[in-house]
Amino acid sequence: MRPTSPVRTLKIIAWIELLGGIAGAIMTALVLPKLAAQSHVSTLRLLPWLAPPFVLSLVAGVLLLRGGAVGEILSSINLALQVPVLVTPFLSYFFNSGLALRMWIGPDGPGWFVFLGSQFHISFAPRVPGILIGVNAVAVTLLVWLIRAMPDGPAATTREIGVAHSA
């Protein structure tokens, strides 16, 4: 099996972000009216809380496909936001856009969960019996691949002219 080129790696990550962002947008469109009705709040007041993670995934994916440092930076942020899985009596948080393999240690011991699609969850003062801490292994893997596929710096994208010297 031949190694994957950095350009191909970046495109794979970009497509995962794009598909995750699209899935998140669809999920938001389906859930938003129900959530607004249950919480007696207008959809316009809820939209700024639900849409940004998936908009970030869409924008990061598009810019990463186009190439350049901005896409790499936004993709790094997007993937880093998907790494933590946290449930405490004070805060509960997880986010995945596209694919997740959440692995954790909790009050009942270690656990894992695979999810294909997009989810964004944040809750303040949830009623939970203990603390659960984990990571999204897919996000960690994609973040490592992204960092390894990124150019090393400005010299990697520009041609340097060398001068031969004799001793």
Image (spheres, helix red, strand yellow):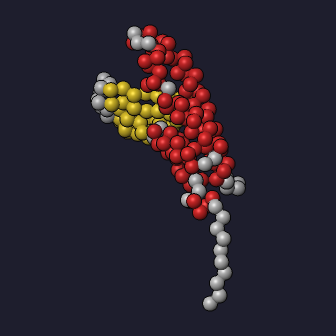
Q: Position of residue 161 (x, y in %)?
A: 66, 71
Q: Quadrant of residue 148?
A: bottom right
Q: Nearer the viewer, residue 43 or 138?
A: 43
- Specify whether 136 is left or right of 11: left
Residue at 46% of width from left, 17% of height from top?
44
Q: Residue furthest right?
A: 1
Above or below, 78 against 117 in this view is below
Residue at 39% of width from left, 32% of height from top?
93
- Specify whether 40 is left or right of 69: left
Q: Nearer the viewer, residue 15 or 139?
A: 15
Q: Quadrant of the C terminus?
A: bottom right
Above or below, 89 against 60 in this view is above
Residue 137 in view: no
Q: Position of residue 66 (x, y in %)?
A: 65, 43
Above or below, 116 against 39 in this view is below
Residue at 64% of width from left, 53% of height from top?
6
Q: Position of residue 63 (x, y in %)?
A: 61, 41
Q: Position of residue 39 (x, y in %)?
A: 39, 12
Residue 122 in view: yes
Q: Nearer the viewer, residue 126 or 64?
A: 64
Q: Quadrant of the N terminus?
A: bottom right
Residue at 65% of width from left, 42% of height from top?
65
- Specify whether 78 is left or right of 167: left
So how many labels did they put on this image? 0
